[in-house]
Amino acid sequence: MAAGGRWIEHWDPEDETFWKEGGERTANRNLFFSVLSEHIGFSVWTLWSVLVLFMGPEYGLTPADKFLLTSVVTLVGAVVRVPYTFAVALFGGRNWTIISASLLLVPTTAAFVVMEPGTSFSTFLLVGLLAGIGGGNFASSMTNINAFFPLRKKGWALGMNAGGGNIGVPVIQLVALAIIGASGGPRVLLGIYIPLIVVAAVLSALFMDNIASVKNDTGAAKDAARDGHTWIMAFLYVGTFGSFIGYSFAFGQVLQNGFGRTPLEAAYVTFIGPLLGSLIRPVGGKLADRYGGARITLWNYVAMGAATAVLIAASMRESLGLFVTAFVVLFVLSGLGNGSTFKMIPGIFQAKAEAKGLTGEAAASYGRRLSGASMGLIGAVGALGGVGINLAFRQSFLSYGSGTGAFVAFLVFYAACFLLTWAVYLRRTAAPAAGPAAPTEEKAQLSYAKV
């Protein structure tokens, strides 16, 4: 193994002796600094969900303009997740973390320059597009950490990595709350994050490692894209992470437009949901490690549907207290589901490896190869759910003057996610998702409930 950022030539986390004699320590060190970089990436990605709260009438933007602005930021963050996933294999996990962290200086500095009344809406859209690159950090970070940990630890490790990144959303909202409360401007917020980006890049260079066995493999991307389970999991991830990131962008605007809250009043509560949703994500991974990701995901969708039904009732009654409470609960459930769904991914491809007759390191290598490649595609499609949520709210407010219509659509979608999870991963007579099944694949299908 290597220290100080050198390439690690031999890495076998499934070997318990190797793991205990230094593998675990190295993996945890890389996890810690991966979380730091991804955390700041999430903050930059969701920067505009905070900046729009500063943008009063003097900026000349309508509520529809603001929802469109946050939608395009979410869209770019989703799209760049695909190339970011494969950048890890091309450059190395440590090397790409340095590059991706440094790139965050571009949208942050650009926002610092243009953030003032009189700037055109098209300019804000362009700078918002740049901020989308912060969403790509999640995909490269998850792919990198997936390679460091053994299957038995992946739920916890991926949950910690993603949760630590997700918490960048409420942190930047809390910082914005403090600045608004102190009558500061948006450039103060941006000025705080620019040096933090530099710190993250430097620490990544000093303390992270590359794994030599993680080679650039375009075949893995093609195989992952051809596998039906990749797209099934992408659909389910729309329901969990798409909800988390979409609501994170939209919560403050819904409170302002639907309940007449001021920017400061909205900022007082918008951070609570993303904070709890981020903190609970490792718990979702841990529960999935113990009870199976499919089971946790299934019942989580039941709870998400119930919370959404309460939101519809609260929105129709214009009950602010009930609305905020239900929305926070929905955030928590989306975070729990994020952890359980992402735990399912390596388990599914491990089951497929065993169905092919592979065992030991061969099975683990097959699983890492396809699960790592699929994570970028699944993460990208999942993040697109955030775009859909913001566009749904925009249309709902344009058509009905409230967010009720959007919540009805979300309820229907959660019901579809519940049925899909049950049909594919828990119904014992279900057929495999990826093409005609060999007898061994039929046997593996029965083990998907354990993923």
Image (cartoon, helix red, strand yellow):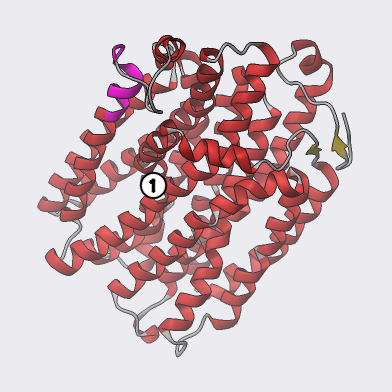
The residue drawn where x is 78% and y is 50% is 95
Percent of width and height locating residue 406? 21, 54
The magenta span reads 420-429
**Which secondary structure type mostly characterizes the magenta part of the structure?**
helix
Observer-nearest of 395 and 43: 395
Name the amino acid, label 1.
Gly
Left or right: 76 in relation to 315: right
Q: Name the residue under label 1.
A: 242
Does residue 416 appear anywhere in the picture?
Answer: yes
The number of numbered badges drawn on the structure is 1
The residue drawn where x is 80% and y is 54% is 202
* Residue 32 among those drawn in magenta: no
Does residue 272 appear anywhere in the picture?
Answer: no
Percent of width and height locating residue 114? 55, 82
- For residue 269, above or below residue 190: above
- Sort mark 1 into few (<14), some (14-19) or many (20+) by Cα contacts within 10 Å: many
Observer-nearest of 240 and 177: 240
- For residue 423, above or below residue 389: above
Percent of width and height locating residue 228? 41, 33
* Residue 427 among those drawn in magenta: yes
Q: Quadrant of residue 40?
A: bottom right
The residue drawn where x is 89% and y is 36% is 3
- For residue 170, above or below residue 157: below
Q: Looking at the rendering, in which quadrant would you find the N terminus?
A: top right
Percent of width and height locating residue 215? 74, 39
The residue drawn where x is 60% and y is 37% is 220
- For residue 28, above or below residue 104: above
Left or right: 160 in relation to 260: right
